[in-house]
């Protein structure tokens, strides 16, 4: 994994943040909305990548992405689950607990 988007071969970072021409890149309307000129857009695009992501957040993002779960607060997860009529978080690990009466043979 690259430490920074500029180091990733297939990233558009060099084009959008540093102005390097790439014939494969087509700018999106959201990119144009970042500023009124190329310099403003590049500065705003660079700023998008300055946020620090903690190791715990990175693990949560990777876990959700790799397993197809929703990442967000409980309300958001419930809304998405209701919208798609599907569970959006993993079930608890292990077998379901038996009730205490069943364990004691009652």
Image (cartoon, rainbow, N blue to C red):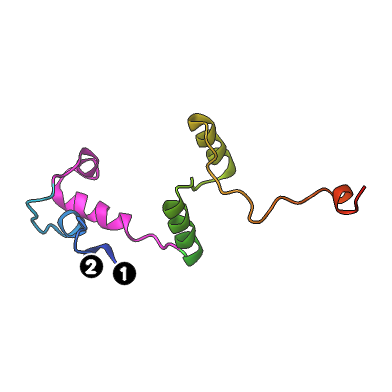
Is 13 on the left or on the right of 74, as rendered?
left
Is 19 on the left or on the right of 86, as rendered?
left
| Viewer-nearest residue: 44 or 99 | 99
Q: Residue 65 at x, y = what percent?
A: 42, 52
| Viewer-nearest residue: 66 or 41 | 66
Residue at image coords 66%, 56%: 94
| Residue at the right extreme of this rendering | 106
> Circle 1 — which element?
loop
The magenta stretch spans residue 28: yes
Q: Residue 98 at x, y = what percent?
A: 79, 50
**Given contact means CB atoms under 8 Å apart, are the residues at marks 1 and 2 in contact?**
yes
| Residue at the front extreme of this rendering | 105
Q: Residue 11 at x, y = what percent?
A: 21, 58
Residue at image coords 49%, 30%: 83
Per the rendered image, the range of residues in magenta is 26-53
| Viewer-nearest residue: 70 or 46 | 70
> Circle 2 — which element?
helix
Instruction: Tell me the residue that label 2 is attached to.
Output: 7
Q: Which mark is residue 3?
A: 1
Give the Cα separation between the discs numbered 1 and 2. Answer: 7 Å
Residue at image coords 26%, 62%: 5
Q: Residue 53 at x, y = what percent?
A: 43, 62
The magenta stretch spans residue 106: no
């Amino acid at each position: 994994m690259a430490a920074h988007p500029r180091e990733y071969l297939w990233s558009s970072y060099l084009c959008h943040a540093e102005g390097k021409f790439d014939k494969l890149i087509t700018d999106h309307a959201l990119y144009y909305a970042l500023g009124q000129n190329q310099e403003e857009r590049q500065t705003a695009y660079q700023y998008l990548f300055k946020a620090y992501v903690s190791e715990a957040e990175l693990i949560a993002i990777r876990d959700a992405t790799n397993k197809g779960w929703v990442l967000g607060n409980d309300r958001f997860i419930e809304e998405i689950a209701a919208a798609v009529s599907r569970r959006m978080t993993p079930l608890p690990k292990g077998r379901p607990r038996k009730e205490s009466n069943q364990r004691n043979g009652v």
